[in-house]
Image (cartoon, helix red, strand yellow):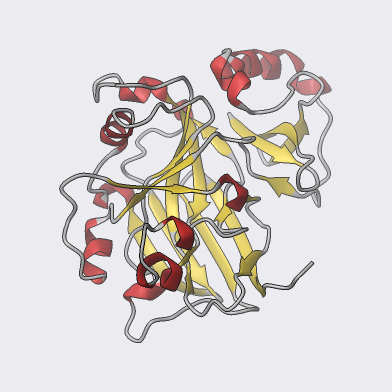
Amino acid sequence: MKLIRFGEMGRERPGVHIAGTNYNVSTFVNDYDEPFFANNGLQYLKQLIEQQISTLPKIAEDTRIGCPVAKPSKVVCIGLNYAKHAKETNAAIPKEPILFLKSTTAIVGPNDKIIIPKDSVKTDWEVELAFVIGKKASYVSEEEAMDYVAGYVLHNDVSEREYQLERGGTWDKGKGCDSFAPIGPWMVTKDEIKDPHNLRLWLKLNGQIMQDSNTDDLIFNIPQLVSYISQFMTLLPGDIVSTGTPAGVGLGMTPNVYLKAGDVIELGIDGLGISSQTCIAYAKH
């Protein structure tokens, strides 16, 4: 299944994407949130679609699509998790996963605008495979880890490199700015992705390919990440874990290339759809 959420920002409703068409399921499902995943919502939704597909209302094609998961308790991200990306940034291969948290207030829809922060000159792009937790995970073994994965999403882990790397402290302040987490268009359930460790992922800037890689370059795979993170914090249903970005970010180029107002980013992952964001300068509301 492909789960979507649609409607104006902050008032999204749940839907599904089937064979190129979006359908509204909000009469039957409250939202794709922690209670939904914790209470066998995916199984219920699958049965609903099988029984009610002919009666579900279609969603207009021009309707805004939001992040397919509602109000995750946290977004956990992994740094330097592609071997070639570590090399391009002159970083050592990590011995353990590098963890940081991305603010949930950074989450936007897959085609919403990216706001370049006030006074920023080093805003960068990062196409990433992310996965959604399906049930509460604490001290999980690698052998059982995939049982805790509900599905996968496309994520652009937008980053401000000066804030992240030059201002001291942790990476978080360069990762959590408003609009820095475009996610979607869909959450694709685990059964539809045969091998998450063999997916092409790519990103274009103004039509030019900047990143073009495969998840087979991951240093730490998904079972390793679920198990590792769950040793340090409890992952709740609906939480999002983003697995890192491959080579081709602006930081790794000589000279560096960073985003500016008017730039258009397009990105995609096999089976998880395509998203597109236009960059705009910060403006006081």
Measured as percent of width and height from the top left, residue 104 is found at 57, 45
Q: Is residue 105 above or below residue 240?
A: below
Q: Is residue 253 left or right of residue 26?
A: left
Quarter-of-image position of residue 117: bottom right
Q: Quadrant of the C terminus?
A: bottom right
Tell me the residue at 56%/64% (across/down): 266
In the image, residue 91 sits, relative to residue 56, either above or below, namely: below
Tell me if residue 20 comes above or below residue 39 in the rendering: below
Q: Which residue is at a point 24% across and 43% down the rendered structure image?
A: 220
Query: In which image quadrant can residue 73 be found?
Result: top right
Q: Nearer the viewer, residue 220 or 204?
A: 220
Residue found at x 38% / y 20%: 147
From the top left corner, tell me how far across and down residue 144 is, in percent. Answer: 29, 19
Give coordinates of residue 284: x percent, y percent: 75, 70
Residue at 68% x, 41% y: name it: 20
Q: Position of residue 149 (x, y in %)?
A: 42, 27
Quadrant (top left/top right/bottom left/bottom right) for the N terminus: top right
